[in-house]
Amino acid sequence: MVRVRYNQGWSRRGFALLWDADVLARLAPPRAVLSLRRFFDLVDDWPDELPAAEGDALIVAGLEGCLDVLSGEDAAQWLETDLREAVFSFQDFYEGQAGLILWVPSGRNRISMNGASETYHWKHRDAGPDGLPIGRLLFSGAENEVERLLSTDDSGADYDGKHWAGLHHPRIS
């Protein structure tokens, strides 16, 4: 069963992949978005104050470019080790009381869900027809806790439709 999230409270806790530019603009000005390189520089030296969501979130851009230059095998390994370890460091430092948002502008076209298995995949040139199993790699099998972010308060909105703004997980482990 697909979980959905309609409100903006998600940005202050957990981990998200976001691709809706209007939602991004409400969370932070462009200058507050960090590069992936800067994000990795901050590991183990996290700032006391965060630049997004009124001080409760960090927004990072560059995931797509990183995945695009890696082979499918290297991208999977990097997601499962390097990126996950950095996310764990962030979550541990802020004790789950801050949000980490990865800005992935093409995410809507590159992330798909297998309805039968409820697994999420990232379309990658070198990862076979299904793509990278991004849900397994990032959420460690807790894909059933992933929420689809919708950019509307309309509870009747189609979770696969135009309001699908991203994915959110309350805390990866």
Image (spheres, grey):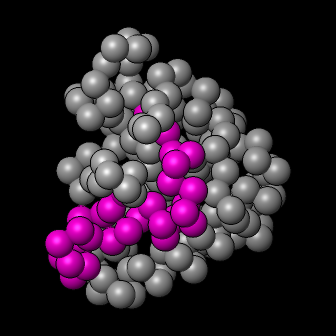
Q: Quadrant of residue 86?
A: bottom right
Q: In this image, 93 relative to 113: left or right?
A: right
Judge whether residue 36 can be spotted in this image.
Answer: no
**Which residue lies at the image location 54% right of the left edge and 63% below the top edge?**
141
Q: Is residue 7 or residue 21 the one in the foreground?
A: 7
Magenta span includes 126: yes
**Which residue lies at the image location 65% right of the left edge and 36% below the top edge?**
12
Q: Quadrant of residue 76?
A: bottom left
Q: In this image, 107 relative to 35: left or right?
A: left
Magenta span includes 123: yes
What percent of the width, then of the height, locates residue 43? 69, 70
Q: Is residue 107 or residue 161 the one in the foreground?
A: 161
Compared to residue 171, the image places residue 7 above or below, namely above
Compared to residue 93, the image places residue 52 above or below, namely above
What percent of the width, then of the height, locates residue 40? 59, 71
Span colored in magenta: 120-149
Compared to residue 154, the image places residue 5 above or below, namely below
What percent of the width, then of the height, locates residue 142? 57, 56
What percent of the width, then of the height, locates residue 18? 41, 44
**Which residue lies at the image location 43% right of the left edge and 38% below the top edge?**
1
Judge whether residue 57 can be spotted in this image.
Answer: yes
Q: Is residue 118 or residue 76 the one in the foreground?
A: 118
**Which residue lies at the image location 34% right of the left edge and 43% below the top edge?**
19
Residue closest to the far front: 116
Q: Quadrant of the C terminus?
A: bottom right
